[in-house]
Image (cartoon, rainbow, N blue to C red):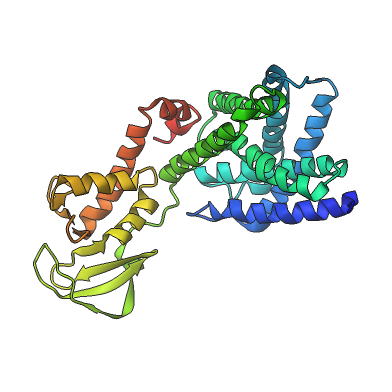
């Protein structure tokens, strides 16, 4: 069955809308207005495709690795960054945290890819099959190429002028895009395409976790937001005062017992892990708990011994203020440790250095 270009556009934009919802779901601290994302994606796609078409009128790439990087990657990533600058007014009021840089550049990349997919499918023998493959590989690829530019763009617009970060992000995006296309162009490298594709997505999510760690939009860990659960009376043992009189509350997705005698928090391993995921997104939680299990039966997480983890009962016992401070302080330490790695040092130059 052959589809008209209008039918292909409808199909592509419907699938694109699904991708947009997926992108938005990663904005876990302060979700962006969906209609603004739709506007930016639609018009961002149009502006970036027009810019690409104009540049390709003067630049004619060959199907090889060198041109894939120096021409294809350069032209298309420049066009997406150009669209983000041109259309910034659409999102200016909502553009208020570091994660937004990734979310909105992903929206522009999605818009670019949707239009590109329509053009490719128009002349294909198996149009739906091609669209499916391109959404799985090309669309996800386009998003993963551009995340670096989103970080640098946010810093440039909201923190301070960040020309060096923008240049570095453009180089990284161009290199990622060029390698992706170059591996497809070169038959000798095609076998390495899937590992490269997976690696680029892996880097995308690592950068997203760094952005999570820097985000100022996390809900403050505070008592007033603890919701007392029905039938909240429980008999969980408190290792601080050794009483068994507690009440059950919920904060975010974590259930937290509070000792009625000394007000210490008592948190299961599962719920402790949920809090770590939210407040310490860069932490490798499996490794963290594995080290705790190897350390001893009762592990002190701070120097004052007010935050204790019972490895046998898999339960945390902590004073509220101490635990709150520990979450924020350890998140900063996670980032400092990360930026001492080669990857972290490179990403630091995107603009994170101005957020420290």
Q: Quadrant of residue 154?
A: top right
Quadrant location of the C terminus in the rendered image? top left
**Residue at 63% of width from left, 42% of height from top?**
140
Image position, residue 35 (x, y; %): 68, 57
Quadrant location of the N terminus in the rendered image? bottom right
Whether 112 is drawn above or below 252: the answer is above
Q: Quadrant of residue 274?
A: bottom left
**Residue at 44% of width from left, 28% of height from top?**
343
Q: Quadrant of residue 106?
A: top right
Q: Would you say residue 356 is visible in this rendering? A: yes
Q: Residue furthest bottom?
A: 231
Whether 126 is drawn above or below 21: the answer is above
Residue 298 horizontal side relative to residue 258, left or right: left
Q: Residue furthest left?
A: 242
Please name whichever residue, 13 or 88, is drawn nearer the observer in this view of the structure: 13
Please name whichever residue, 252 or 296, is drawn nearer the observer in this view of the structure: 296
Q: Would you say residue 226 is visible in this rendering? A: no
Image position, residue 26 (x, y; %): 53, 51
**Residue at 49% of width from left, 38% of height from top?**
207
Image position, residue 338 (x, y; %): 36, 33
């Amino acid at each position: 069955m052959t589809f008209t270009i209008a039918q292909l556009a409808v199909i592509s934009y419907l699938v694109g809308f699904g991708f947009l919802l997926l992108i938005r779901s990663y904005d876990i601290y302060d979700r962006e207005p969906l209609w603004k994302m739709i506007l930016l994606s639609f018009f961002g796609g149009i502006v970036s495709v027009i810019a690409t078409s104009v540049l390709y009128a003067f630049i004619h790439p060959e199907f090889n690795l060198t041109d894939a990087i120096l021409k294809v990657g350069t032209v298309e990533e420049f066009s997406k960054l150009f669209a983000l600058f041109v259309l910034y007014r659409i999102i200016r009021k909502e553009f208020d945290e570091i994660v937004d840089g990734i979310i909105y550049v992903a929206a522009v990349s999605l818009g670019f890819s949707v239009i590109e997919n329509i053009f490719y499918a128009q002349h294909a023998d198996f149009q739906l099959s091609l669209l499916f493959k391109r959404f799985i590989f090309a669309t996800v690829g386009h998003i993963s190429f551009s995340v670096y530019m989103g970080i640098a763009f946010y810093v440039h617009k909201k923190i301070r002028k960040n020309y060096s970060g923008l240049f570095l992000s453009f180089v990284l995006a161009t290199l990622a895009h060029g390698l992706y296309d170059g591996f497809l162009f070169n038959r000798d490298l095609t076998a390495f395409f899937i590992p490269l594709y997976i690696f680029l997505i892996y880097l995308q999510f690592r950068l997203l976790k760094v952005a999570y760690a820097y985000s100022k939009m996390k809900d403050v860990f505070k008592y007033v937001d603890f919701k007392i659960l029905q039938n909240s009376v429980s008999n969980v043992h408190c290792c601080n005062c050794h009483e068994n009189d507690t009440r059950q509350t919920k904060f975010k997705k974590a259930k937290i017992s509070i000792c009625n005698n000394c007000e210490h928090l008592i948190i299961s391993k599962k719920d402790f892990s949920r809090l770590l995921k939210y407040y310490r997104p860069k932490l490798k939680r499996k490794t963290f708990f594995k080290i705790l299990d190897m350390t001893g039966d009762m592990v002190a997480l701070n120097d004052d011994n007010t935050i204790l983890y019972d490895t046998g009962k898999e339960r945390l016992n902590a004073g509220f203020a101490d635990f709150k401070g520990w979450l924020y302080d350890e998140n900063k330490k996670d980032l400092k440790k990360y930026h001492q790695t080669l990857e972290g040092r490179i990403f630091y130059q995107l603009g994170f250095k101005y957020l420290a």
